[in-house]
Image (spheres, helix red, strand yellow):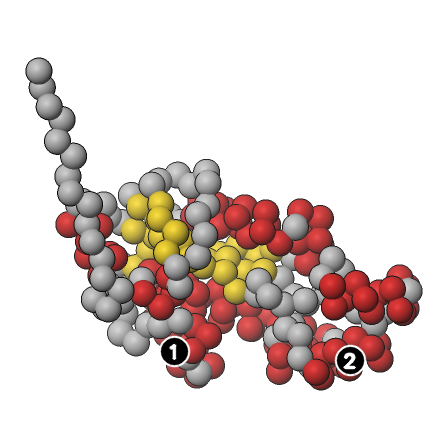
Amino acid sequence: MTVAFRPRPSVVRRDSGLYAYERALARRGLTPIAGVDEAGRGACAGPLVVAAVVLRRQVDGLGDSKLLSPAVRERLYERIVEVADVGVVVIPPAEIDARGLHKSNVSGMRRAVARLTCDPEYILTDGFPVPGLPAPSLAVWKGDQVAACVAAASIVAKVTRDRMMVELDGEFPVYGFAEHKGYVTPGHRRALETHGPCSHHRYSFVTVAREMGENEMGAGVA
């Protein structure tokens, strides 16, 4: 009788550095490796932006985009797009309202991977599993803090979205989008109370829905 031997699973210590997951997978012959993350999940205005990144070479200074200064994020973004295969998907508020946030996020992750020019052998996603990906995948808790390709994806998604929110601020200056990027802040709440929501708010979110009810459907900024 022939006995099939399975390779022992790789153990990745979370204190082994940002490239530990990539090194462990590469030792198994699983390259290229894609990281996937999103920006804007908790905002009540603006799009959800999802990015998939395959790093072709090491980028120094990567980390969770939320913990980096805007200037550092911008510098790293430029470096990432120079040395990586990048796929980006922008999901507008209307789609989030129609499909729900989580379904939109999962769909966006699949679409972002599909936009890569290479075919990844393995995919790391931030936080939760994503069914229907074209390669084996692993959901990594706080992946943008422990896996380089996920950290790179978080930076690409964050910088892309922040730039879009700054542009929206020029179109709808009363909300202060350039400052809070569509997240719920005291200033954003006051602007919603005064002006009602605009077409770039997510009407299905509680904060916006409450103001919709109080200001009525047509009272917002068009």
The residue at which mark 1 appears reads as 75
What SS does tag 2 mark?
helix
For residue 138, say whether it is visible: yes
Give amino acid for label 2. Ala
User: Quick check: 149 left or right of 65?
Assistant: left
Q: Nearer the viewer, residue 36 or 15?
A: 15
Q: Position of residue 81 (x, y in %)?
A: 38, 65
Residue 14: image location, x then y, percent = 27, 64
Instruction: Determine which residue is flagged by label 2.
Output: 191
Amino acid under disc 1: Arg
Q: Which mark is first along the chain, 1 or 2? A: 1
User: In the rendering, at what x and y percent does residue 207 appear?
Assistant: 74, 68
Residue visible at 89% across and 62% down? 217
For residue 82, side relative to residue 88 (left or right): left
Residue 181 numbered tag: none
> In this picture, is 177 found above or below 25?
below
Q: Is residue 16 above or below residue 189?
A: above
Residue occupying the point 56% across, 73% down? 163
**Disc 2 to disc 1, how far (Cα)?**
32 Å
